[in-house]
Image (cartoon, rainbow, N blue to C red):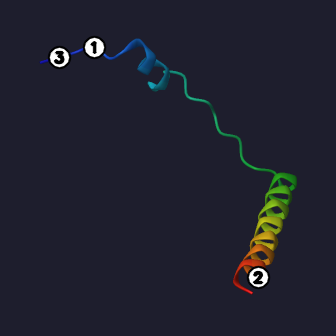
Amino acid sequence: MLFKLNPILQIFARQKEDKAEKPLTRKDWINVDRIVMIMLILGVIIGAIIFS
């Protein structure tokens, strides 16, 4: 039996237009690396405080 989806769920349906993904530039990679390094350092500090 076929049924119609709720109109609220139509928001989550795949859109017909696909966005073209642009490659990351060197500056973007550097920014991502900095964010990851800050998160790792903060994780180590928080872990040291919790487990000490």
Snapshot quadrant of residue 38:
bottom right
- Percent position of residue 26, x then y: 84, 56
Relative to 3, 32 lies left or right: right
Q: Amino acid at mark 3?
A: Leu
Q: Tell me the amino acid under the disc marked 2.
A: Ala
Of the numbered discs in the image, which one, if any, rests on residue 4? 1
Residue behind mark 3: 2
Which mark is on residue 19?
none
**What's the residue at 36%, 15% (across, down)?**
6
**Which residue shows up at 27% across the image and 13% down it?**
4
Look at the numbered disc 3 and give the secondary structure of its residue. loop
| Location of mark 2 (residue) | 48
User: At 42% across and 21% down in the image, what residue appears?
Assistant: 9
Vertical side of 25 occupied by 37: above or below: below
Q: Against 48, is 32 above or below?
A: above
Question: Secondary structure under badge 1?
Answer: loop
Outermost residue to the left: 1
Q: Secondary structure at mark 2?
A: helix
Does residue 29 appear left or right of residue 1 in this picture? right
- Amino acid type, label 1: Lys
Disc nearest the viewer among 2 and 3: 2
